């Protein structure tokens, strides 16, 4: 039962985005901080309690671990939404009643597949008539050409037969296009997302009811993740850069920045960025929330466990450290990144001893007995 609960907690934690995870750890820190008010007597207690507190040495319950700053490729995390690469509404290019829908909604389609059939009515007959007229005009033109070379017809008559042949060919081409337009085909590989009409509905050229399109086709490969980048981070983002993508209940993925807006959104003053994500089997649907990690500059940072994050009296985020003579210090930090190994933080000296156990029982300015403090080694 315990292992089942642990599994459920791990699954729940993995589904959280970075800001939520950080909030969870801060909440844990606040809880521990508040708990010290119950565990340790306050200064307002009796003189007897104060004396007992002063006499108690908490050094033996403290553990420290050495940490050395490392180069870290800083990233920023953006929340975005998955979108299809293309969404196209297909409209009729010829008028008539709908005769059939060969494919159902949700079907994967290939470029050229017939999606809608409009009743051809008398279009086949019009095509045959146009073909016959072209044959007739060709015979007339050739005959006029022979007579013109022999001097038995005028140039005007010869020009007329040529014009009539060109008109007949143009009418034939129009009849062929009109008949071909009775079949609306998929413009690319994708999914037939929606049908907005029924068999028997009459459609006009370019319009159908309130929807404006008879069918809608989407292209889910590649998938696009759209997010907004703050103005301050815009100069640090590289076009075509590789980014990490995390979608809830889906393994960590890798994409590429394909577009970065040059004009900011008027309301938020942020810039739209689009990340291209391969989706060959259409396994990832559109409309999901996704976290995009964009690489920025390389900085010196410490990798620390989330459990050592503490709060000062004003609620500031930091970690507690111990110097060479046992002095306790609260060091404000900036959380740069969260990984499976821990949190990358900036704001600490190059080499420090981090308090990894008993943070709630010590405070800034306190002095510990280093002989009693447990040393755990170096944080990788």
Image (cartoon, helix red, strand yellow):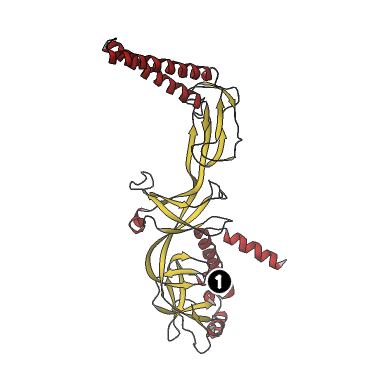
Between residue 152 and residue 128, name the one nearer to us: 152
Residue 8 seen in the figure:
yes
Residue 279 placement, left or right of 174? right
**Residue 82 horizontal/vertical position (percent):** 50, 48
**Residue at 51%, 26% in the rendered image:** 210
Q: Check disc 1 and report its element: helix, strand or loop.
A: helix
State the quadrant of the N terminus. Answer: bottom right
Residue for point 36% across, 14% down: 143
Task: Tell me the residue that label 1 is attached to.
Answer: 37
Is residue 312 visible in the rendered image? The answer is no
Provide residue 263's location: percent of width, then percent of height. Answer: 33, 46
Q: Position of residue 313 (x, y in %)?
A: 46, 68
Asked if 24 appears above or below 287 in the picture, the reply is: below
Nearer-the-camera pick, 51 or 352: 352
Q: Please tell me which residue lies in front, 77 or 33.
A: 77
Q: How many marks?
A: 1
Q: Residue furthest front?
A: 150
Question: Relative to 71, is 76 above or below?
Answer: above
Q: Position of residue 68 (x, y in %)?
A: 43, 78
The furthest residue to the right: 1
Which residue: 58% across, 61% down?
13
**Picture quadrant where residue 170 is located:** top left
| Mark 1 crowdedness (10 Å alpha carbons): few <14, some 14-19, many ≥20 | few
Question: Which residue is found at the position 63% from the left and 63% from the top?
Answer: 9
């Amino acid at each position: 039962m315990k292992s089942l609960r642990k599994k459920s907690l791990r699954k729940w934690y993995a589904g959280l985005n970075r800001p939520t995870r950080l909030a969870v750890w801060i909440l844990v820190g606040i809880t521990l901080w508040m708990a010290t008010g119950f565990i340790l007597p306050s200064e307002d207690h009796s003189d007897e309690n104060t004396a007992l507190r002063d006499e108690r040495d908490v050094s033996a319950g403290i553990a420290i671990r050495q940490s050395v700053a490392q180069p870290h490729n800083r990233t920023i995390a953006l929340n975005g939404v998955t979108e299809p690469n293309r969404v196209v509404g297909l409209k009729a290019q010829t008028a008539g009643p709908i005769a059939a829908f060969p494919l159902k909604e949700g079907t994967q389609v290939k470029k050229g597949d017939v999606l809608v059939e409009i009743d051809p009515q008398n279009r086949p007959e019009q095509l045959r008539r146009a073909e016959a007229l072209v044959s007739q005009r060709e015979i007339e033109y050739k005959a006029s050409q022979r007579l013109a070379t022999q001097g038995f017809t005028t140039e005007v008559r010869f020009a007329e037969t040529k014009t009539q042949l060109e008109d007949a060919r143009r009418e034939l081409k129009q009849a062929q296009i009109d008949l071909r337009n009775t079949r609306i085909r998929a413009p690319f590989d994708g999914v037939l997302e929606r049908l907005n009409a029924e068999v028997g509905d009459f459609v006009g050229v370019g319009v159908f009811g309130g929807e404006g399109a008879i069918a809608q086709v989407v292209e889910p490969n590649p998938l696009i993740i759209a997010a907004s980048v703050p103005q301050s981070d815009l100069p640090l983002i590289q076009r075509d850069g590789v980014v990490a993508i995390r979608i809830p209940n889906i393994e960590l993925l890798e994409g590429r920045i394909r577009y970065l807006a040059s004009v900011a959104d008027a309301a938020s003053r942020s810039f739209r960025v689009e990340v291209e994500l391969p989706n060959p089997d259409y396994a990832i649907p559109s409309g999901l929330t996704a976290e995009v990690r964009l690489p920025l500059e390389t900085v010196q940072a410490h990798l620390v466990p989330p459990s050592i994050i503490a709060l000062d009296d004003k609620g500031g985020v930091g970690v507690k450290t111990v110097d060479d003579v046992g002095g306790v210090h609260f060091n404000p930090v900036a959380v740069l990144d969260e990984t499976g190994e821990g949190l990358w933080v900036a704001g600490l000296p190059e080499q420090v001893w981090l308090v990894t156990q008993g943070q709630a029982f010590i405070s800034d300015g306190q002095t510990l007995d280093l002989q009693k403090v447990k040393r755990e080694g170096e944080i990788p």
